[in-house]
Amino acid sequence: MASSKYSKKTPKTSRANSSVRAIDRVSHLPNNILHHILSFLDTESTVQTSILSRRWRCLWKDVPVLNFSRNSSFLDKSDFQKHVDKFLSLRFESTAVSSISFDFGGEALRGQSAGKEIFESVMQYIAAAQGRISHVFISKTSHAADIRDMASAMVEHNLHGSLETLKLHKSNLKNSLLGYGPGFKLLTTLELQQCAFFSSASGKLIDPFANLPTLYHLKVINCTTWGCLLKVSGPKLLDLEIHILVSQHLVYSTFELVEVSAPKLKSFYFRAGNKKSTEKLPELNLPLLDNACIRLWWTKQKHDHPLDNETAERHNHECMNLFCGLHNAKSLVLRFDMESWWTIPEEQCQFPLTRLKSLMELESSPFTRLQNLKVQSHYFFGRQPSIPYQVVHYFFKGSPDTKEKLFKFERVW
């Protein structure tokens, strides 16, 4: 009998696809790569992911990066505490922990002083297993006492001496960042985001970073001060970022930064982000500065409705004082963020640097090494704001004459 023309042969393309699907390219990756992948997950997800492969079944027990996140699966503080305790008890005892992250989010937990007990149990585990920790990230604690008690726990178990990186998010800081100062002898990187600085005495000047002897990198992002004045200093700071974007909805929320002093600072980023930012620009003492980026809040001034003389004069002198503090910069970026730019036609507005023209003509330039100047702002309808020659000349006239000087105006959104 003739063979049927409908032969049941598997197409070559199907066999090829089947063989490709049969190759597992993930399960047999080296453990260090798998650990790196799991380091981006919280501890609960790490355990759940480890059951996907027989080889991975115990992989979560020696992951060096622990992310404890109180997510929606934990109904209250006790559930989260049980998860942390069980996770630590089942880990391999010989495994080192290099980094720990705590996210105490969730309404049910944030309403309680929950962070310190959980943090204490983790510090006990690390002290018993290895006695050192390099990186700590703490987010969304609800009480100022939590941060003090967490710092005390690190000191009590002698773990603060090995800490290299500390990041605090939405936390309260009273009087000083950590009252143990020099004990954090290896702390090189500190990041504070949406934190609040407190002081027991109203109007007191606090300098929370001065006693951190090896601090090289500092970020203070959208923080507030309550009843105190803030000074930022560091004997070995190399780069500093300060973002001021105070909430418009918090009536008593301010950020009173009065001074920045860092004798070895090389890079400085400063952003005064809105009307509720500190009214007075800080005094700067940055003798070795190389690169600076300054973002200022620009209230548009109509030609026919100028600011009152006192306010305008204060704004102008504060800007000139700020430039004096940046005198050693080689590269300078000035960005002006505008208030309600959509309500006033561009042609009716005076660019902020133009307001300083008369002062710049009279005063000598503080800049002695400036080679690159970039001005950034919004402008519309294809029209670039006019910056007088005297303004540009002010920035460069104190620097050595070279052919490498560069001025650029950029449009930003």
Image (cartoon, rainbow, N blue to C red):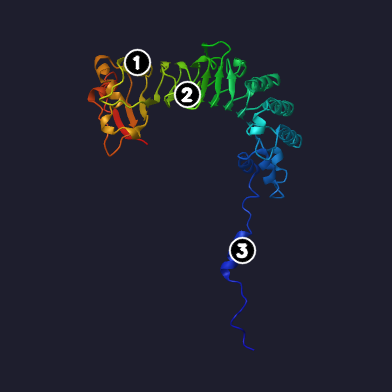
Q: Is residue 248 left or right of residue 312?
A: right
Q: Which mark is on residue 240?
A: 2
Q: Nearer the viewer, residue 357 or 63?
A: 357
Where is the C terminus found, in terms of image quarters? top left
Q: Amino acid at mark 1?
A: Arg
- Tag nearer the camera, 3 or 2: 2
Q: Which mark is on residue 18?
A: 3
Residue ID for mark 1: 314
Count all numbered tags in the image, as a single digit.
3
Q: Is residue 355 left or right of residue 258?
A: left
- Residue occupying the far bottom of the picture: 1
Q: Amino acid at mark 3?
A: Ser
Q: Earlier in the sequence, mark 3 or mark 1?
A: 3
- Tag nearer the camera, 2 or 1: 1
Secondary element at image label 1? helix
Q: Residue drawn 23% across and 25% down?
A: 389
